[in-house]
Structures are given as structure tokens and as C-alpha cells.
Amino acid sequence: MKFKRHNKLEHGLRQIDIAPMIDCLFLLLIFFMLTSSFTFQSGINVKLPKAVTSDVIQDQNVIVTITSENVIYLNGAVITLKELSQKLKESGYKTKPLLIRSDRRASVGRVVDVWDLCRNLGIERIHIATNQDQ
């Protein structure tokens, strides 16, 4: 049995239609964009006060955040003043510097309460976070 090959090329170039390939690529792109999970870090919205004489701190800090509603956070977790006292009594927290990030609308009394608590526990390096005035 003899098979014939029909490989006659027409004169000129053959053109490949790439429209279906582009459609498939766009569908794959949309599929991956919709199915990928985006991770958003939850943050605490704090508007820091501005200061002209602020310095940049390079150390690893224990961060206490006070929101405009006077809610206290320790390293991102909600905490009461009594729980803050117990946590800061632990040995690991006493050696690190403490950074107080207070919203500009937070009451000064709450900031002073946290400051006094830290001083009573023997924490000597206490900083208040500010934005540099530009």
C-alpha cells in the first residue's frame, strides 16, 4: 500500500489566526486574577501628631497603640490597662524600648496612664511616635 503525501505549499506565506490564542490568554488571566487570594493586613488607623524635633528610632520596639476612641493595643492586639500591666511585667518586655503610638485625638489622660504604668514597671526607654513636620 502506497500512501501519498499532500504537502504542496501554496505560493506565499501561510497565516496563523492568533485571535483564539489571545482569547484563551485573556480568559486565563481573568481566571487567575479572580481565584487568587489577596491578603490584606489589618491595621489600626492612627493619625500621629506632627513634631519638628522628632528622631528616627532604629531599635526593635514594643508597640503600644492608643486609638482616637482610647482603645489600647499591644503589638496589634486589643488589651486593657490591667492586662497591659501584666504583659509588660514579663521579662522580655522590660529590656526592649517601648513605643507609644497615640492618635492625635486620643485623650492625654490615657497616654499619661500608659506612660505612668510603664515607668512604674521600670521601663526606662519610652518613646512617643510622631510624624516629622515637613
Image (cartoon, rainbow, N blue to C red):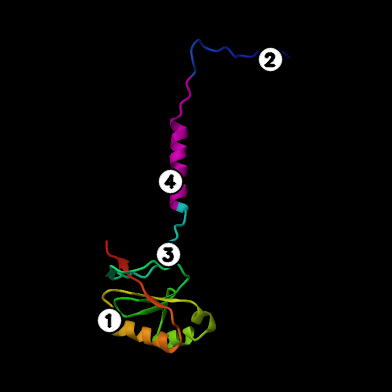
User: What residue sits right under mark 3 in the picture?
Assistant: 41
Q: Earlier in the sequence, mark 4 or mark 2?
A: 2
Q: Nearer the viewer, mark 1 or mark 4?
A: 1
Q: Nearer the viewer, mark 4 or mark 2?
A: 4
Residue 125 vertical placement versus 36 (above, below) = below
Q: Earlier in the sequence, mark 1 or mark 2?
A: 2
Q: Earlier in the sequence, mark 3 or mark 2?
A: 2
Residue situated in front as seen by the camera: 56 or 42 = 56
The quadrant the N terminus occupies is top right
User: What residue sits right under mark 2 in the picture?
Assistant: 3
Which amino acid type is shown beneath numbered disc 1? Ser
Per the model, the C-alpha gap separating discs 1 and 2 is: 93 Å
Per the model, the C-alpha gap separating discs 4 and 2 is: 46 Å
Residue situated in front as seen by the camera: 71 or 130 = 130
Q: Secondary structure at mark 2?
A: loop
- The image position of residue 108, as x and y in percent, is 28, 82
Which amino acid type is shown beneath numbered disc 3? Gln
| Residue 30, numbered label | 4
Q: Earlier in the sequence, mark 3 or mark 1?
A: 3
Q: Residues within 10 Å of mark 2 (few under 14, many from 20)?
A: few
- Contact, mark 4 vs mark 2 (Cβ under 8 Å): no
| Residue 107, numbered label | 1
Per the model, the C-alpha gap separating discs 3 and 2 is: 67 Å
Q: Secondary structure at mark 1?
A: loop
